[in-house]
Image: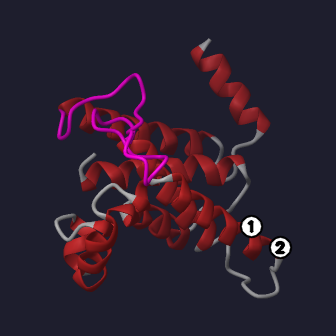
Amino acid sequence: MIAPNHLRWAAGCWIITAGLFKIPLTPIDLGVATISGLAPDLDTPKSSIGKRFPFIAYPLGFLVGHRGFTHSLIAIFICLAGLTWLLQHPQLVGWQHFVIIPFLIGYLSHLLGDMMNPSGIPLLWPHQQRYRFPFHWSYKSPVEYVFTWSFLLFALYIWWIAGGYPLSKDTLLKLENLFF
């Protein structure tokens, strides 16, 4: 995915997640989730985020290469371990639902997005085999653009019919009746 599509995809993933887990949707957490949808690409100075943080992107890219460690299960487990630890120690960080959880969702959304690309991602890094979904489209494809816009608009629609927050059982039943 290209950066604008990663941003839309991450925002949609956070809106759905926040609703399902009854987390209030605020501009802060939405912004964190959306921007962190670019975080795995800090491994290359050619990426949108890498151009803004070259002091991170150059050394990280040199050490692990693009779509290496930052796009692997190891990175996911590090994120999950950190998240788990923070959630077990709420007295240390009272703002985890504003920053940590949205960051993790945005980060994970990036990896899912890159698995919709024909080149996939090396989930088992340093093993170089790449994994992708059976449905995928080429980089910069119009399908990717339409998909990410549609997904974001769908997430916003679900959030809106839920009354803005959160996604209740009644809202999910309304959706079921709408589509089935």
Task: Tell me what residue is drawn at x 26 percent, y 54 percent.
Answer: 4
> Label 1 near label 2: C-beta < 8 Å?
yes
Viewer-proximal residue among 174 and 75: 75
Kindly state the secondary structure of the residue where label 2 is placed: helix
Residue 121, percent from left and from top: 38, 44
Residue at the extreme top = 180
Kindly state the secondary structure of the residue where label 1 is placed: helix
- Magenta stretch: includes residue 117: yes
Give, as a three-letter code, the residue at label 2: Gln
Task: Tell me what residue is drawn at x 53 percent, y 66 percent.
Answer: 103
Chain part drawn in magenta: 115-141
Task: Tell me what residue is drawn at x 68 percent, y 26 percent.
Answer: 174
Instruction: Residue 3: name its quadrant.
Output: bottom left
Residue 178, percent from left and from top: 60, 19
Residue 35, percent from left and from top: 39, 66
167 vs 87, left or right, is left
Instruction: Work out which quarter of the rendered image holds the N terminus and state it.
Output: top left
- Magenta stretch: includes residue 24: no
Q: Which SS type dominates the magenta stretch?
A: loop
Instruction: Residue 100: name its quadrant.
Output: bottom right
The residue identified by callout 1 is 84
Instruction: Work out which quarter of the rendered image holds the C terminus and state it.
Output: top right
- In the displayed structure, 105 sits above or below 167; it is below
The 10 Å Cα crowd at callout 2, few under 14, some 14 to 19, many 20 or more, is few
Give, as a three-letter code, the residue at label 1: Thr
- In the displayed structure, 59 sits above or below 19; it is below
30 vs 85, left or right, is left
